[in-house]
Image (cartoon, rainbow, N blue to C red):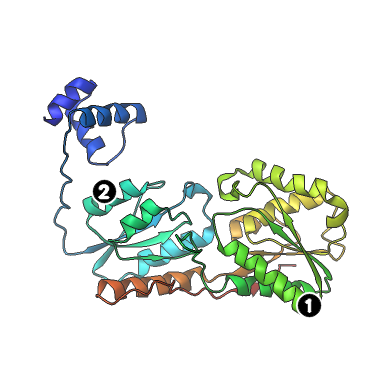
Amino acid sequence: MTMTEIARRAGVSQATVSRVLSGRGGVKKEKADAIIKCAEEMNFKFKERKPRPTSGLKNIGLYYSGDRFERSSAPLLYKYNFIAKSLPKDFNTILLPAPLSPEELKKEVTRRGISGLLITGHNNSPELRKVLSNVPHVWMNSHDNMMANSILCGNDDAGRIAARYLIDNGCSRLAAIRVPSRNPGYAARIDGFLQEASQFHHEALVFPCGDENQHFENLDVNELEEVIDKTFASLEDIISRCDGFFCPDDLVTAVLYRILHKHNISLFGGVRVISCNNDAKCLAGLFPRPATIDFAPVLTAELAIKDLMQQLQGKTKDSRINITVRPQLITECK
């Protein structure tokens, strides 16, 4: 059975059939579903095209495993920019489209002749793990794992830095804002925060916001604000007595400022906030500017490149994450 027959039955052109069956995309879902259904009914076996010969450059794919790339932080772009400028001269960078399912990723790797992947995002499904088992790759952030969460070393340290910062600035009633996240590193940051506060015999509370399955990365800003505001409204008496707040992400911090203002908690009366990621686009409009913790995204990208190059040279990859983030406190602007 030929693609011509599939095209005839599906009522589309042969070129459209080719695009769908080769995974190139660009076809409306309804039309693509009809083509796939016809192909399955005809038991059509499509042979994946071999990658075209290149000029000798090896392709490295930048793959985002999440669902909403547009919500990515500025540090992610710093990583991508560094990689594009810093790969060895015989390597070429390919930014893969997002979102991209594991099956689509597999086709892109074959079609584009990709030698290795540098991965961001936190989704690591069994289907994705199966695809990655056959491709040299390095994760550049914490992510899900089958048996346990794979968390970059340094997230716990960030929480400890946050607690020490608040304590050193006279705060005695500390609070951490916990919004469910796909990033397992966030939980590690809060754990470190609580441990450090306890070591210095300071009270530290955690205020959970939202449903555990309602990850903040998938919420728009208004939805995120609503989730946090519900917690503040229900615990207002307790929260109003806190004088130091820790958020594990700058986007959450930007929303927190609106909530604090709404509940008449003044940031000019000794209340301090510290955040994570040093994401300028989230912090730019906040006053007084909160302290934040930088995770050295450029260094992370540099280590990821070295790790991937070792794999491509045939060296065995350790099952543990080889990237270690180095958190650094950035104090607020006056």
Task: State whether residue 48 is above or below residue 243.
Answer: above
Image point 71% across, 67% down: which residue? 333
Nearer the observer, 250 or 127: 127
Q: Is residue 82 left or right of residue 112?
A: right
User: Of marks 2 and 1, which one's residue comes earlier in the chain?
Assistant: 2
Image point 28% across, 77% down: which residue? 315
How many neighbours does mark 1 have within 10 angstroms: few (below 14), some (14-19), or many (20 or more)? few
Q: Is residue 286 left or right of residue 322?
A: right
Image point 55% across, 70% down: which residue? 295
Residue 135 percent location from the top left of the image: 29, 62
Q: Secondary structure at mark 1?
A: helix
Residue 274 percent location from the top left of the image: 71, 65
Q: Answer whether residue 285 is visible to the viewer in this image.
A: no
Quadrant of the image occupied by residue 185? bottom right
Q: Mark 2 and mark 1: span between their CA atoms?
A: 53 Å
Residue type for callout 1: Asp
Residue type for callout 2: Lys
Image point 66% across, 68% down: which residue? 191
Residue where numbered disc 1 is placed? 168
Seen as rendered, the residue at the extreme left is 1
- Residue 252 is tagged as none
- Which quadrant: the C terminus? bottom right
Residue 78 percent location from the top left of the image: 47, 63
- Residue 107 is tagged as 2
Residue 41 percent location from the top left of the image: 21, 28
- Which quadrant: the N terminus? top left
